[in-house]
Image (tube, rainbow, N blue to C red):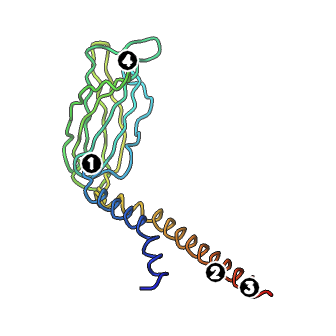
Amino acid sequence: MSSQTKKLFKSMHIPLECAVAFLAMTLSSSTARAHNGPPFPIITDQRVGPCIVSLWIHPDIGTSPIFVLVDPAPGGAIPKDLKIAIGIQPVGGRLAEVVYPASIADQRGQLEYKTDVQFDQQEFWSVRLILTSSAGGGESLAKVEATPVGYGRWDLLLFALPFLAVGFLWFKVMTKRRRQRKLRLQQASFADMRLP
């Protein structure tokens, strides 16, 4: 094996270890299985009964989380007996509406309700936010399209490919520059040795 080949293997040792570690983490990850991005709002700062609500959803086919952020209306307070439910139904009406009760999750001072709903296929769905309390109630409607879940744990690798490609190109350019600089230095030292 030539000295250049040995140097090449030595210089690729750390990037190769990093690539193997990245692949191992990607393939063993199960927490990001059906998540292609953060939830997004379909109802934003809308007054419903005695509260201002925002509804955030991650509409994957299958089980999808819905988050409802609740704030008091200006000059008011959030009722202690506040209950929130989410009704979903295909826009085409092929299924009857299913209502899911939401449970409270106090997130650092922000009152949040969460529930998981089921979308059985890719299509547009009506989402109905139902708010009830002794201080009044109300509803808000929105539509959302349920989307396929993607490739699960492979999404991270798929989305990282452009960045890995840029890193690889950078590595190739830096290696080529280093080789050229080394060659120039060798030629300059050889030229100095030839001078009388």
List x then y, in percent, for residue 13.
41, 68
Residue at 64% over, 80% down: 183
- Specify few, some or many for label 3: CA neighbours under 10 Å numbering under 14, 14-19, or 20 or more: few
Mark 4 crowdedness (10 Å alpha carbons): few <14, some 14-19, many ≥20: many
The span from disc 2 to disc 3 (Cα, nearest Å) is 12 Å
Q: Residue 121 location in percent, x, y?
A: 24, 55
Q: Mark 3 near mark 1, Cβ–Cβ under 8 Å?
A: no
Whichever of labels 3 and 1 marks the residue nearer the N terminus, that label is: 1
Of residues 115 and 124, the one drawn nearer to the viewer in this rendering: 115
Quadrant for the N terminus in the image: bottom left
Where residue 158 sits in the image (x, y, percent)?
38, 63
Q: Specify which label sits upstream in the sequence, 2 or 4.
A: 4
Q: Residue 106, percent across and down?
A: 31, 24
**Residue flagged by tag 4: what amino acid is it?**
Pro
Check disc 3 and give the amino acid type: Ala
Residue 183, label in figure? 2
Identify the residue position indicated by label 4 in the image. Answer: 50
For residue 65, above or below residue 2: above
Q: Which of marks 2 and 3 is nearer the N terminus?
A: 2
Residues at marks 4 and 1, CA–CA distance in whole angstroms: 37 Å
Name the disc covering residue 100, or none: none
Location of residue 98 by image quarter: top left
**Quarter of the image where the C terminus is located:** bottom right
Kind of residue sitting beneath label 1: Thr
Q: Which of marks 4 and 3 is nearer the N terminus?
A: 4
Give the Cα distance between marks 4 and 3.
86 Å
Label 2–label 3 contact, CB within 8 A: no
Q: Residue at x 65, y 75 (%)?
A: 181
- Residue 80 in the figure: left or right of residue 39: left
- Residue 196 against residue 116 in the figure, above or below: below
